[in-house]
Image (cartoon, grey):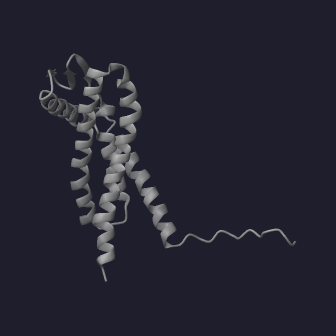
Amino acid sequence: MPGLAREKAAAPPGPAGRMIARFCLLFLLYISALGLLTSTPAAGRLLHDPVARCFAFLSRVILSLFGESSGSESNLAYNGFGVQIVEACDGILPAIIYLSAVLAFPSRWIDKGWGILIGFPAIFLINLTRLVTLMFVGANWPDLFEQVHIYVWQALVIALAMAVWVFWAERFVRTRSVARP
């Protein structure tokens, strides 16, 4: 009939569509496997607890430059405001998300290695900055702590981890594929 548009049949996915589907499938597989592995009691003892203690120690050192800081194990206090660094705040989850994205991305293993070498320290520094700034906020504006903790820093950590991944993909993977003859 005139005036009616015909619907086109969807084209079968080409190489780019298959590559995207493969990335998504591998990403979900890696994130699920790593998430399960890091949620075990053994991972708590061998990974989460030591990482939380390390973050508490480093945060105490930095905060002591600006005021009174103290703590033990994964507990941290600054100018009368105290927190405990728990599993959800130790930076392991953003690292898992980042690692899953690097491993799932179509690239050479050497490039994946560079992604891990660049990404893990970057995410570690992002989380350390998060903890120190949250302690400043908690000590100076305790009413704002929960909002900054939940809404500001959760979004920032995700966005910054994604930015690190994009940097790696553009700088180490894309430039190599463009440079190849």
Check the picture and name the quadrant holding the N terminus.
bottom right
Q: Residue 132 in the image: x percent, y percent?
A: 23, 32
Q: Which residue is located at x 28 percent, y 65 percent?
A: 172
Q: Residue 26 in the image: x percent, y percent?
A: 41, 57
Q: Would residue 85 be visible to someone looking at this image?
A: no
* Front one among 155 and 91: 155
Q: Quadrant of residue 150?
A: top left
Q: Which residue is located at x 33 percent, y 47 percent?
A: 160
Placement of 3 over or under 155, stated as above or below: below
Q: Residue 120 in the image: x percent, y percent?
A: 24, 49
Q: Quadrant of residue 80?
A: top left
Q: Which residue is located at x 23 percent, y 43 percent?
A: 124
* Front one among 43 and 65: 65
Placement of 19 over or under 58, stated as above or below: below
* Front one among 91 and 140: 140
Q: Residue 170 in the image: x percent, y percent?
A: 33, 64
Q: Would residue 21 be visible to someone looking at this image?
A: yes
Residue at the limit of the structure toward the right, as seen here? 1
Residue at the limit of the structure toward the bottom, as seen here? 181
Drawn side of residue 20 relative to residue 107, left or right? right
